[in-house]
Amino acid sequence: MATRGFVGKRRPPDGVKLPPGQYDVGRDFPVLTAEATPRLDPDLWTLTIDGLVEHEHTWTWADLHALPQSEYRGDIHCVTTWSKFDTSFGGVSLDLLLDAVQPQSEATHVFVTSTTGYTTNLPLEELRDGRAWIVWSHEGKPLSREHGGPVRLLVPRLYFWKSAKWVTRISLRDHDEQGFWERNGYHDLGDPWLEQRYQGD
Ligand SMILES: Nc1nc2c(c(=O)[nH]1)N[C@H]1C(S)=C(S)[C@@H](COP(=O)(O)O)O[C@H]1N2
Ligand SMILES: [Mo]
């Protein structure tokens, strides 16, 4: 059914680097944290992937560092309208971790939890095929505490609030459940190229 005059949101043409409504923040790297910044001991921190998986698994800091490392170099986009171009993060690909746990076919979404209680939700596919990492370095240096150090999720294709700092659990589910910002009106997916800032966008 075509509605006359309706124009859906479209991705900008190739070569456009700035998603709609964003500006280039330059060398700055603003800090956005809703809760108090925790002081995590990497030796006590763990990451668990559970829920609709064949083999629930918990990794220690040492376990993750023993895996093949990979780097993201590219852009990040915060819903408060700053974008940061060509920045790098190092850690492990979520693909490796998902391969280890083997998602069940019913799994469609993930619910991500930080040690602080911060939560966020996203479709499972947004963590696959080279789209997401668990990272502990930024521009070759250990990730600073305020940016999620020692360790955070990185999902650069989506608005940056999906990249939970101090991540500790990723639960696979057969439904979408809203996290902290999503319950407060932000979008369940948050694709910057479609300017999905708020519920209903
Ligand atoms: N645990 C936690 N993770 C979080 C947030 C937060 O408040 N708490 N803020 C999100 C938001 S809104 C953004 S824009 C980015 C900011 O990351 P930065 O502070 O490293 O720039 O982290 C995301 N991850
Ligand atoms: Mo944000």
Image: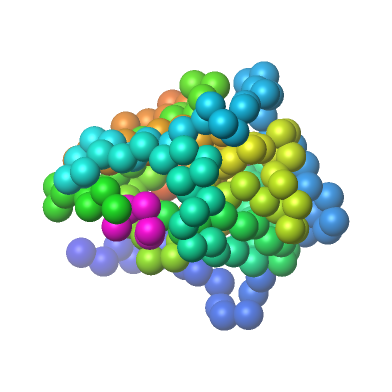
The chosen color scheme is rainbow
Residue at image position (85%, 56%) is 27
Determine whether 119 is above or below 124 in the image: above
How far from the left and from the top, in percent, is residue 33?
A: 66, 29
Q: Is residue 6 visible?
A: no
Q: Which stretch did the figure color magenta?
A: 95-99
Tell me if residue 186 is in the magenta stretch.
no
How far from the left and from the top, in percent, is residue 137?
A: 67, 51
- Per the picture, the main secondary structure of the magenta-coloured stretch is helix
How far from the left and from the top, in percent, is residue 167?
A: 50, 35
Q: Give 113 or 77, whichever is nearer the viewer.
A: 113
How far from the left and from the top, in percent, is residue 181?
A: 51, 30
Residue at image position (29%, 57%) is 99
Determine whether 112 is above or below 38 in the image: below
Residue at image position (52%, 43%) is 62
Tell me if residue 97 is in the magenta stretch.
yes
Q: Give 98 or 60, whichever is nearer the viewer.
A: 60
Q: Is residue 60 visible?
A: yes
